[in-house]
Amino acid sequence: VTMLFKLCNHRMFHSAGRVLCQLEPCGAVDVDQAVKAAKSAFGQWSKMSGMERARIMIEAANIIESRSEEIAQMETVNNGKSITEARLDVDSARQCILYYAGLAATLAGQHVQLPGGSFAYTRREPLGVCAGIGAWNYPFQIAAWKSAPALACGNSMVFKPSPLTPVTAVMLAEIYAKAGAPESLFSVVQGGQETGSLLCHHHDVAKVSFTGSVPTGKRIMEMASKGVKPVTLELGGKSPLLIFQDSDLENALRGALVANFLSQGQVCSNGTRVFVHKDILPKFLKEVVKRTQRIEIGDPLLESTRMGALVSRPHLDKVLSYVDQGATVLCGGEQFVPSDPKLRGGYYMTPCVLGDCTDEMTCVKEEIFGPVMSILSFETEEEVLQRANDTTMGLAAGVFTRDLRRAHRVVEHLKAGSCFINNYNITPVEVPFGGFKMSGIGRENGQVTIEYYSQLKTVFVEMGDVDSLF
């Protein structure tokens, strides 16, 4: 497996603020080497049957299961999230690879009968070498979510993890190799924007799949357009969570916490604009603040920890800057120093709930990407729908209500790609995930993603003579 893992620039152990490893970004020669090796692997992999590819992918999933605790612990060190969440991420990766292994043998075309005994058929064919560019919030899971459908369709992939979380993608490359994949079928290049740009512009890269911010997604789309390459973009969000007066309050509270504080709030689909009906607002505020204050912060490797460290010092400072933007701080929003001396250099903060928010506030309009919940009041369904949709992004949305007619009516009008009724941030690999508007293009997971990692060829077969006008 091509793993260009050189030594130079330092990276951080987020929960302690210490150096974890040192890496050198891959340059033009390194990227070209990786893409050429992936192209060679593609030649072998694409000629295998779906069943043959599935066998190797299933073995990779089995290896992940056998090493799950080791991978989860490394992901916690890699990212700073709690070990409890890291275990869920690793299992999501395993399930994704298993799911697409099951689909690999089902890829098929269509036969169309035409007049005079002629016919046409379609072939679903792989694209070639795909580039995957990952984000730092779900490093191992994203590497699997991108590679599994790509490999199931017969492609190879060169993957660039975020330079903030470079480690666990390499473990996935090792696992694919150990499972019997051709050499360099899934390879890893390390680096930042320049390395990503080299991948996007490489003439042998057929597709780019990116998870990250809206501004970076725009640049990747622009770079891919030079070669008219298809892109999958899973970008940011400022998603609304609507809590109506007839909601099951206990479930609504749980949903709001899950919608804001998973992975230290560093989740693109988070429902950070929590719209609560005015009739239940006082009761909701009292209880959500109480529960937020109880969240256990500290060493992410401890079983009791529910919130670990943010990914970097600059990101922590950015998140903290949103707290004092005019809203009322009901709790949290401060830098947190753990009692353990070894962790005092880590990038921790107390989870924050903001009250008295209005739609025009910066904390309500911009994606914070941290543990900050903004609570807004509403009175009518029509009003809250207009306000919920008043954003350039549309990744996710949620509604809590006991009225199923209202739930489906509201979801129909929410301009978001992933909607939740009476739950939030549930991402089973069997269903598509992706956004509307500036939150992205294409989908990850589910059967439809096969279409984003393959291309359709139409073949016409004439069984008679050519009927020519000339």
Image (cartoon, rainbow, N blue to C red):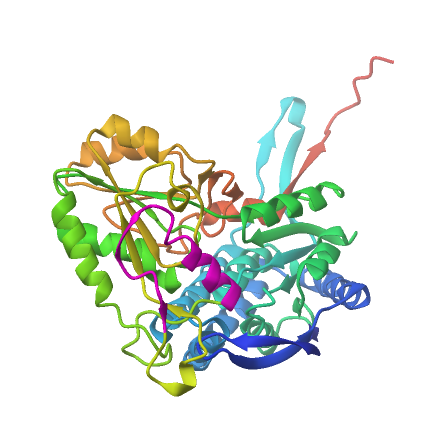
For image coordinates 38% across by 63% down, the residue present is: 264
> Which residues make up the magenta segment?
313-336
The answer to if 103 sits in the magenta stretch is no
Q: Is residue 222 left or right of residue 384?
A: right
The residue nearer to you, when weighing 115 against 153, is 153
Q: Residue 308 appears in which quarter of the rendering?
A: bottom left
Instruction: Please provide percent x and percent y for residue 234.
Output: 52, 49
For image coordinates 48% across by 67% down, the residue present is: 311
Q: Is residue 371 left or right of residue 96?
A: left
Instruction: Please provide percent x and percent y for residue 92.
Output: 41, 64
For image coordinates 17% across by 61% down, the residue present is: 290
Q: Residue 384 appears in which quarter of the rendering?
A: top left
User: Looking at this rendering, what residue extends furthest in the top direction?
Assistant: 469
Q: Is residue 221 left or right of residue 319?
A: right
Q: Is residue 1 visible?
A: no
User: Looking at this rendering, what residue extends furthest in the right direction?
Assistant: 470
Across the whole image, how many numbered discs are drawn on residues? 0
Image quadrant holding the N terminus, namely bottom right
The answer to if 327 sits in the magenta stretch is yes
Q: Is residue 141 visible?
A: yes
Residue 324 to residue 8: above or below: above
Q: Is residue 142 left or right of residue 192?
A: left
The residue nearer to you, when weighing 17 against 231, is 17
